Image: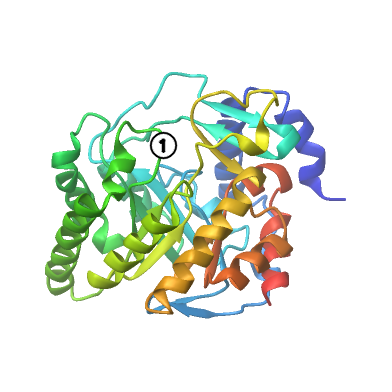
Amino acid sequence: MNIYSLVRPLLFLLDAETAHDLTLTSLKWAERLHLLPDYAGKLVATPRQVMGISFPNAVGLAAGLDKNAAVIDGMATLGFGFIEVGTVTPRPQPGNPRPRLFRVKQAQGIINRFGFNNLGVDHLVENVKAAKYKGVLGINIGKNFDTPNERAVDDYLHCMQKVYAHASYITVNISSPNTKNLRALQEKDALSALLASLKFEQTKLTEQHGRYVPIALKIAPDLTSEQVSEIADLLMQHQIDGVIATNTTLSREAVKGMPHAEETGGLSGRPVKTASTVVIQQLSQRLQGALPIIGVGGILSGADAVEKIAAGASLVQVYSGLIYQGPKLVKDVCMSLG
């Protein structure tokens, strides 16, 4: 019997964010007390070379679950080929008022309006340094809610400078719907200026640290095909190393009329699966292999992950699927991808 299937009904009796916090705290202490089964040791390694990095397997933890890099070692026991922490901002910020996390159980979806709640980049770096984990670590960076878009690049560069020495790759998050006007950074001129600055800083930091840390851009599912093509062209023009598709959606088409469906925030899980896959297909057609795609959005089974790879992704990430399926999802995806 899958232990999580017994625990999940109890967690679902709690407020979603309380359950989230309790799960992370439990995972952290279970790892410290050596109470966790060794999921990682039971998985057959199927290495993938992506962005110049060797990934032990193709399934990663998406950003958002471990914002402060507080439970890296606990997450590592679940068998992920890579772990992405954050989103982190230069300064600590509380995020939006609670309640801000909701389950749309009927659709296996999650709505969140966290708003980049985190303890700041310095705190995250200290947690990363304290972790025993030596695997592939992505660090996802954002801007503070009160930093105007015309100065957003300063926040991204500040975070990039702070995390560079500690990251396997850096993800630039311009696609969360929960920070006002953040998605405007996906528009052509703003994005081109941001990518140019990031690339210039990457060159400087490579020389300074003696190692090249790839940059990936995380984009939204709520883009037109023209916007996806524009972004793909800019990624190639500025020689960005990878793209993560996608973040959460603002659309409520797939959950119309369901409890919590009208809560504001980004919708993830099963309802975003198709939109995410369509963006991956569009990116793949435009990029023609120029840079890799990491597919995320609605992966609740091995078959869902296979669909993302078939659409053009090189790797996949999970988040909401873990809430509904538990740790066995990592093994299921690994086995399906071979």
Q: Residue furthest front?
A: 226
- The kind of residue tagged 1 is Pro
* Total numbered badges shown on the rendered structure: 1
Q: Nearer the viewer, residue 323 or 181?
A: 181
Establish if 28 lies above or below 235: above
At a point 61% along the width and 28% down the height, the residue shown is 16
Residue 248 seen in the current view: yes
Q: Position of residue 2 (x, y in %)?
A: 82, 50
Question: Residue at 48% of width from left, 65% of height from top?
Answer: 282
| Residue of label 1 | 177
Q: Residue furthest right?
A: 1
Q: Decide which of 162, 316 is in the foreground and name it.
A: 316
Instruction: Using the image, determine if residue 294 lies above or below residue 191.
Output: below
Residue 50, x across and y down, in percent? 44, 76
273 lies left or right of 136 = right
User: Residue 24 lies in what quarter of the image?
Assistant: top right
Q: Secondary structure at mark 1?
A: loop
Question: Which residue sits at x=31%, y=29%?
Answer: 93
Q: Residues within 10 Å of mark 1 (few under 14, many from 20)?
A: many
Residue 128: x %, y % from top left: 37, 53
